[in-house]
Structure formats: C-alpha cells, structure tokens
Image (cartoon, rainbow, N blue to C red):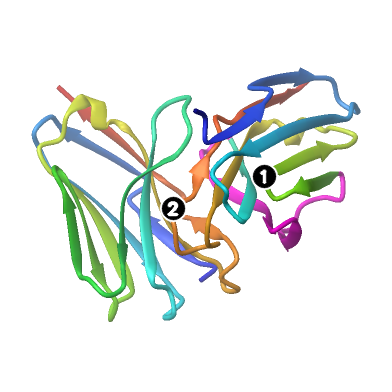
Amino acid sequence: GENVEQHPSTLSVQEGDSAVIKCTYSDSASNYFPWYKQELGKRPQLIIDIRSNVGEKKDQRIAVTLNKTAKHFSLHITETQPEDSAVYFCAGPNQAGTALIFGKGTTLSVSS
Amino acid sequence: DTAVSQTPKYLVTQMGNDKSIKCEQNLGHDTMYWYKQDSKKFLKIMFSYNNKELIINETVPNRFSPKSPDKAHLNLHINSLELGDSAVYFCASSQIQTNTEAFFGQGTRLTVV
C-alpha cells in the first residue's frame, strides 16, 4: 500500500560476495513486486519482478523471493561485480492501486 | 526507438520563472506518471494519469500543473519556481497502473538558482 519500507539504505560488499535487500509492504492485496536499478545519472530500470503466485524467481545472478505471510520480498544478488554498484528500489502499489510507490532506495557499493 | 522521452534533459532557471517539461511515450501505455527524485534519491510520485484523466495528485503545490493532451503525452508545467523545486523529474508510463513494468524517461535535472 502506501508504505513500502526498504532496508538497508546503504550496503557495501566485496566483489564476489552476495547482497540482500529487503522490502516490506502493508497492503495484503498487493500482487506485483518489482525491483528497479538506477545507475548514477541514469533512469531507474526494472531488473526483476515477481507476482504473488510464486515464491521465488531467478535471472542469472539476481533473484527475488516473496513471503506473502510476512509481507516482505527480497532482492538477492550473488557473485557481485563492480557494475552492480547502483541504487536499487523496490516498489509496490499505493492504496488505491493507481501508482507505484517506491521504497527509499538502497545504495549498493561493490568494491574490487 | 526511445520508449519514454522527456525534454529537456537539463534545465537551469531563476527563481520565480515558469517552465515546462515535456514527456512522450510510444509504448501505447494507458498510464503516465511524474516522479520527483530529490538529492537523497527518494523517488516520490507526483501525478498519475490514466487515459488522459488525472488519477493521482499527491501533495504537490498548485504551482505544478500536469497536462495530458492525449494518452501518449504528459507534460509538466511549473509556475513561480522555488529553490526547493530543484530535483530530477522523471516521467514514466505503464500499461496497467501498478501490475506491470513502469518505463522511465531519461529524467530532467531542474536547477533553480
């Protein structure tokens, strides 16, 4: 719903490590859970999304898991690389279902 | 082919001026949005239009007036610009409001001096 809470706000990892970013939402009716990546100076772009009828979705090194009972979904990046450094946003619908509300973002820094 | 295009990319203007940002999408989407991204990177929804009709008007000052001449265009006009309006403004579109991918324009970096 209106509240999409995202943690952590910053995350620093060494190249090759895994990174996990978590979002919680308040609207039980939410059924679409996207993650966006925004590189410095660029537009946000969808990297992966999941719908409520599945619990996990993978695309190469990234995955999203959904726990509808606990109302949270997480982004997992394995074998991180410097080019993964960016701001990542989760999103969910507002209460009226008329717009995507974004979490406050997580700045991921991958150092080599 | 640019899916969502907005102009200008950069806009520097003085306080008190009026300016417009234009947005067009060629994806055939029904819904278009304006988001404001401040220096802390928060992406905040400002307006949402569905088939040219205003759906959302968040707590945005009246100085901001969106206009949608058709469902492929959503322009943003700002009157009496203030220093606090400095931000990056993103236009976006999606097919079905919240259940599908939103595509963003390149952003307009507005600097009010």
Q: Nearer the viewer, mark 2 or mark 1?
A: 1
Residue located beneath label 2 in the image: B101
Residue A98 x, y percent position in the rendering: 60, 66
Please name the amino acid that badge 1 sits on: Ala
Quadrant where the image shows the C terminus of chain B: top right
Residue in the picture at 44% in, 58% down? B100
Mark 2 neighbour density, 10 Å: few (under 14) some (14–19) many (20 or more): many
Check the residue under mark 2 and report the chain it is in: B
Q: Quadrant of residue A82?
A: top left
Residue in the picture at 77% in, 40% down? B76
Left or right, B87 with respect to A44, comes to right
**Magenta stretch?**
B39-63
Residue in the picture at 57% in, 44% down? B92
Q: Give the mark nearest the N terminus, 2 or 1.
A: 1
Please name the amino acid that badge 2 sits on: Glu
Residue A34 x, y percent position in the rendering: 37, 56
Residue B38 x, y percent position in the rendering: 60, 38
Residue in the picture at 46% in, 77% down? A27
Residue located beneath label 1 in the image: B72
Q: CA distance from mark 2 to mark 1?
A: 17 Å
